[in-house]
Image (cartoon, grey):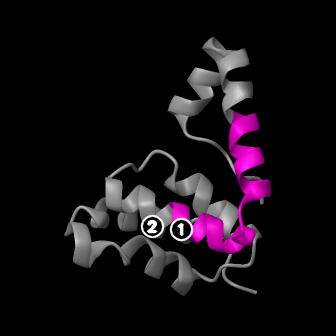
């Protein structure tokens, strides 16, 4: 399954290709230097996006987490992990992740 970026990031990349390239270089380097494995990084990112109420990148990171071996239950749990700290705003991220999971093949 090929992960697709949000419409906003796609537009950003089209209008500001060098800045988008620099941003992706930063993201890739941060991943390389991280002590977290790829699956854990994507699950943590989903938790942060959901807690912050930022839904634009959730479908992309759901796909990336799945590619890294995360189960549906792990993905949903990551989206909900911030609820005790930030409240119900995580539910928007949970809804986007759930819809993304519905459109992807079931766990192997």
Secondary structure, mark 1, is helix
Quadrant housing residue 5 = top right
* Viewer-proximal residue among 103 and 10: 10
Q: Is residue 37 magenta?
A: yes
Q: Is residue 81 above or below residue 9?
A: below
Does 1 sit left or right of 97 as displayed?
Answer: right
Q: Position of residue 34 (x, y in %)?
A: 71, 61
Number of residues whose C-alpha sits closer than 10 Å to that of mark 2, classed few (under 14), some (14–19) or many (20 or more): many
Outermost residue, top direction? 15
Locate the N terminus by quadrant: bottom right
Q: Position of residue 13 (x, y in %)?
A: 65, 23
Q: What residue is disc 1 on?
A: 44
Q: Which portion, as a residue range, is magenta?
A: 24-45
Q: Is residue 54 above or below residue 17?
A: below
The label number, if any, that marks residue 47 in the structure image? 2
The overriding secondary structure of the stretch rendered in magenta is helix
Do callouts 1 and 2 mark residues in contact (Cβ within 8 Å)? yes
* Viewer-proximal residue among 58 and 107: 58
Does 92 sit left or right of 58 as displayed?
Answer: left
How many marks the image carries: the answer is: 2
Locate the C terminus by quadrant: bottom right
Q: CA distance from mark 1 to mark 2?
A: 5 Å
Secondary structure, mark 2, is helix
Q: Residue at coordinates 64% horizontally, 14% vertically from top-left?
A: 16
């Amino acid at each position: 399954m090929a992960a697709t970026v949000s419409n906003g990031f796609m537009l950003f990349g089209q209008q500001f290709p060098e800045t988008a390239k620099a941003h992706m270089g930063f993201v890739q380097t941060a991943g390389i230097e991280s002590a977290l494995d790829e699956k854990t990084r994507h699950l943590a990112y989903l938790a942060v996006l959901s807690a912050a109420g930022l839904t634009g990148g959730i479908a992309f990171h759901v796909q990336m987490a799945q590619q890294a071996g995360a189960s549906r239950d792990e993905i949903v749990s990551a989206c909900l992990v911030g609820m005790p700290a930030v409240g119900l705003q995580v539910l928007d991220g949970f809804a986007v992740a759930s819809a993304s999971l519905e459109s992807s093949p079931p766990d192997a």
